[in-house]
Image (spheres, grey):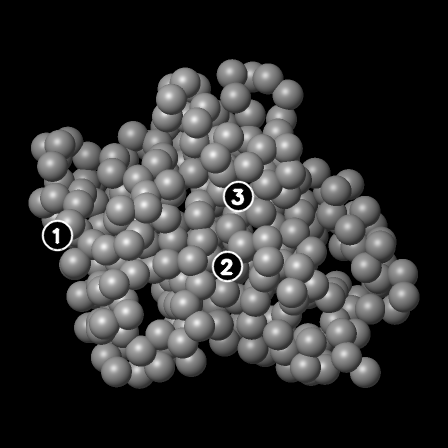
């Protein structure tokens, strides 16, 4: 019987809404808080356009918070009531306590069949894992088969990205070792990646166009002509996205390229102007 396994993730996956609906993924929102106002649920109370307008045009400073265990409990109760198994895949535990909230909710449902997995990534690195899990659930795979797949993908998924400024990563305390890149002159664009669940510096490139070129070159060096599944990520950066899309189309063997806009929670920590790639060899 199909879809006996339900896939849950969180809003930091930055999954496009059409894919969430198509594959029946449940997304638990994190929250963004401007100026100590009421928390806004990412993707529910605030969309990407509204968020970046406040962040860029109004220069408002935001912070983020994880879902409470009660929010996961409500989701798990609903999904498990017909006997479904649940695989709940979340943002790196080195970046957020979201997985811990999920685990606390699981403990409140001792009779349920729930697997909590730390993706060790975020944004569409997490999103691609959730998508593959949901596809396999739709194909009738068992919970154990899907968990094995997810764990394999966690070890394979890679995320590289270029930011306009390190200001937001520093402010949010999410920068990890990338503080080695601080103090560089304005035209230097940091090329960053996720390793062991945190942001790490890869190298420094002068100028946005060169940084995008180098971004593609790094992925190309890693995957060669192998077929990959990939997602192009951007933070309201249509020009950079188009440059990236053209280069990826010409030089990488990427099937079913997904394009994703960074949501409010990840955007809080990266700022606008981000371009990046999440990928794994398929």
Q: Earlier in the sequence, mark 2 or mark 1?
A: 2
Of circles 3 and 1, the one toward us is: 1
Whole-angstrom CA distance, mark 3 to mark 2, is 13 Å
Q: Residues within 10 Å of mark 1 (few under 14, many from 20)?
A: few
Residue under circle 3?
96
**Does residue 208 lie above or below 220 as drawn?**
above
Residue under circle 1?
210
- Residue 126: which disc? 2
**Does residue 176 lie above or below 172 as drawn?**
below
Q: Residue, x 41% and y 62% (percent of image)?
A: 231
Q: Position of residue 92 (x, y in %)?
A: 50, 52
Q: Position of residue 35 (x, y in %)?
A: 51, 16
- The answer, for residue 223, to whether it is visible in the render is yes
- CB contact under 8 Å: marks 2 and 1: no
**Is 43 in front, or is 205?**
43
Of circles 3 and 2, the one toward us is: 2
Q: Residues within 10 Å of mark 2 (few under 14, many from 20)?
A: many
Q: Residue, x 46% and y 42% (percent of image)?
A: 266
Whole-angstrom CA distance, mark 3 to mark 1, is 32 Å
Q: Earlier in the sequence, mark 3 or mark 2?
A: 3
Q: Secondary structure at mark 3?
A: loop
Q: Earlier in the sequence, mark 3 or mark 1?
A: 3
- The answer, for residue 30, to whether it is visible in the render is no
- CB contact under 8 Å: marks 3 and 1: no
**Is 42 in front, or is 76?**
42
Q: Residue, x 23% and y 79% (percent of image)?
A: 224
Whole-angstrom CA distance, mark 2 to mark 1, is 27 Å
Q: Position of residue 120 (x, y in %)?
A: 47, 58
Rendered-image quadrant of the N terminus: bottom right
Of circles 2 and 1, the one toward us is: 1
Q: Position of residue 48 (x, y in %)?
A: 49, 38
**Is 128 in front, or is 96?**
128
């Amino acid at each position: 019987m199909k879809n006996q396994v339900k896939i849950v993730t969180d809003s930091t996956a930055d999954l496009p809404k059409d894919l969430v609906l198509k594959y029946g993924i449940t997304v638990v929102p994190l929250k963004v808080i401007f100026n100590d106002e009421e928390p806004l649920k990412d993707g529910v109370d605030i969309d990407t356009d509204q968020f970046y307008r406040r962040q860029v045009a109004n220069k408002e400073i935001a912070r983020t918070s994880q879902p409470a265990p009660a929010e996961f409990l409500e989701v798990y109760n609903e999904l498990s009531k017909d006997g479904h198994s649940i695989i709940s895949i979340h943002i790196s535990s080195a970046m957020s306590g979201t997985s811990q909230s999920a685990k606390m909710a699981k403990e409140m449902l001792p009779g349920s069949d729930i697997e909590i997995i730390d993706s060790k990534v975020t944004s569409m690195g997490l999103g691609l894992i959730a998508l593959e899990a949901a596809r396999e659930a739709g194909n009738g795979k068992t919970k154990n088969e899907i968990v094995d797949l997810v764990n394999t993908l966690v070890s394979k998924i890679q995320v590289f990205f270029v930011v306009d400024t390190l200001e937001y990563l520093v402010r949010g305390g999410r920068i990890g070792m990338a503080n080695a890149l601080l103090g560089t002159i304005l035209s230097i664009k940091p090329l960053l990646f996720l390793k062991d669940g945190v942001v790490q510096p890869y190298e420094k490139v002068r100028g946005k166009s060169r940084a995008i070129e180098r971004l593609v070159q790094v992925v190309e060096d890693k995957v060669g002509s192998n077929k990959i599944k990939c997602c192009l990520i951007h933070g309201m950066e249509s020009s950079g996205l188009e440059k990236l899309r053209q280069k990826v189309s010409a030089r990488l063997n990427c099937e079913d390229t997904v394009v994703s806009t960074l949501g409010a929670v990840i955007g809080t920590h990266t700022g606008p102007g981000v371009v990046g790639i999440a990928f794994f060899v398929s």
